[in-house]
Image (cartoon, rainbow, N blue to C red):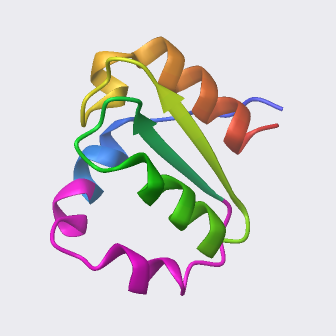
Amino acid sequence: MHCKYDGRVLLYLLPSLVGLDQLSLARSITAKTLLVYDREDIEPIEQAHLLHAIIEESKILMIDECAQLPWIDQPEIFGTALQYFLCP
């Protein structure tokens, strides 16, 4: 199966996610979800594990040196992981 991924979708959605209560929102997510974090992110790593515990069909991807824009800072790692996640 071939899966096309267009990173512009993330850039379009990102502004709408700023300021949301992630934990309240996470409780309503039923879709397969990939949580992407930088190992040195400003958000505590515990947040990733908490979201992972709340969202049933979720996986965590830890990327080094990607700050808040993994698709820009580490495009090969992010793109490959996303493709395998969406098109296993």
Q: Does 43 appear above or below 77?
A: below
In the image, taking residue 33 as reference, residue 56 lies left or right, namely right
Q: Does 25 appear above or below 58?
A: below
In the image, taking residue 24 as reference, residue 28 lies left or right, namely right
Query: Is residue 38 one of those drawn in magenta?
Result: no
Q: Quadrant of the C terminus?
A: top right
- Residue lying at 35% horizontally and 73% vertically, measured from the top left: 22
Residue 73, located in which quarter of the rendered image? top left
In the image, taking residue 83 as reference, residue 77 lies left or right, namely left
Nearest the viewer among 40 and 32 is: 40
Image location (x, y in percent) of residue 78: 49, 25
Span colored in magenta? 14-32
**Count of picture labels:** 0
Q: Does 82 appear above or below 45?
A: above
Q: Does 51 appear above or below 25?
A: above
Image location (x, y in percent) of residue 31: 65, 70
- Residue lying at 56% horizontally and 56% vertically, measured from the top left: 49
Image location (x, y in percent) of residue 67: 25, 29
- Residue lying at 38% horizontally and 16% vertically, measured from the top left: 74
Query: Is residue 22 one of those drawn in magenta?
Result: yes
- Residue lying at 49% horizontally and 12% vertically, measured from the top left: 76
Q: Quadrant of the N terminus?
A: top right
Image location (x, y in percent) of residue 15: 16, 60
